[in-house]
Image: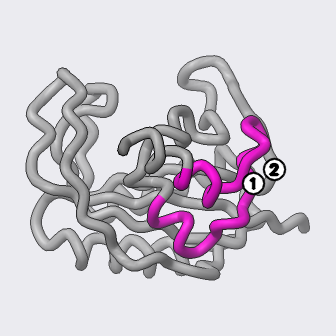
């Protein structure tokens, strides 16, 4: 059975945000075919306004490296199950609104996957290079991980983003 290392981004902006992140990591580690290899510390970040809805309060974000034998669609379904178990309610709005927990596959080894909308995860996660709230936690645990579509490491992307912001 092939094992791949997936980079997973986690975020919460409702309730006990730190506890939600911790519970999510434990639940991911308890998922068949998954083993959590590393977890970043939590990073506090302002909610991103999408124009869809009031994004709620400040987020806590973290990242985890997960060794998995699951395929990308299976892993996405498992992560959605963890979100539901922790009380995430999806209201059909794309990317908008406060949430107890949000878990996304950011990278999955060197896999590049761009299925039709609704047919599976897009890997690497779209917009990764412009999201400090994803890059900073991930750089803490996997700075040298390469984003295959960009040919740059997570650490390089974070440094470039921070340089552009100054």
Task: Tell me which segment is drawn in magenta.
Answer: 136-159
Query: Where in the figure is residue 44, as x and y percent of width and height?
Result: 24, 65
Residues at marks 1 and 2 touching, judged by CB atoms closer than 8 Å? yes
Please report the residue visible at 15 percent of the width from the left and 39 percent of the height from the top: 55
- Classify mark 2: helix, strand or loop: loop
Query: Where in the figure is residue 4, as x and y percent of width and height?
Result: 79, 64
> Which dot, 1 or 2, sits closer to the camera?
1
**Membership of 11 in magenta stretch:** no
Where does the C terminus fall, quadrant-wise?
top left
Where does the N terminus fall, quadrant-wise?
bottom right
Which mark is first along the chain, 2 or 1? 2
**Membership of 156 in magenta stretch:** yes
Q: Quadrant of residue 48?
A: top left
Q: In front: 68, or 159?
A: 159
Q: Residues within 10 Å of mark 1 (few under 14, many from 20)?
A: some
Q: In front: 154, or 69?
A: 154
Q: Which mark is residue 129?
A: none
How far apart, in angstroms, are the residues tagged by discs 1 and 2?
8 Å
Q: In front: 95, or 76?
A: 95
Please report the residue visible at 20 percent of the width from the left and 32 percent of the height from the top: 49
Q: Which residue is mark 1?
A: 146
- Classify mark 1: helix, strand or loop: strand
Q: In front: 53, or 117?
A: 53
Furthest residue to the top? Answer: 116
Q: Quick check: can you spot residue 87? A: no
Q: Quadrant of residue 31?
A: bottom right
Please report the residue visible at 53 percent of the width from the left and 73 percent of the height from the top: 140
Classify residue 15 as left or right of residue 121.
left
Q: Quadrant of residue 58?
A: bottom left
In this rendering, the answer to whether 62 lies above or below 39 is: above
Q: Which residue is mark 2?
A: 110
């Amino acid at each position: 059975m092939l094992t791949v290392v997936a980079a997973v981004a986690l975020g919460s902006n409702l309730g006990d945000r730190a506890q939600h992140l911790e519970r999510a990591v434990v639940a991911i580690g308890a998922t068949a075919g998954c083993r959590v290899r590393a977890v970043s510390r939590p990073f506090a970040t302002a909610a991103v306004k999408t124009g869809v809805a009031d994004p709620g309060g400040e987020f806590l974000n973290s990242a985890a490296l997960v060794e998995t034998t699951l395929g990308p669609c299976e892993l996405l379904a498992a992560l959605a199950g963890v979100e539901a178990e922790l009380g995430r309610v999806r209201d059909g709005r794309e990317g908008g609104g406060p949430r107890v927990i949000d878990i996304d596959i950011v990278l999955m080894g060197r896999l590049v996957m761009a299925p039709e909308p609704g047919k599976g995860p897009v890997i690497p996660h779209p917009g990764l290079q412009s999201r400090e709230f994803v890059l900073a936690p991930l750089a803490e645990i996997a700075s040298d991980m390469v984003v295959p579509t960009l040919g740059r490491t997570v650490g390089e992307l974070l440094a470039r983003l921070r340089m552009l912001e100054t």
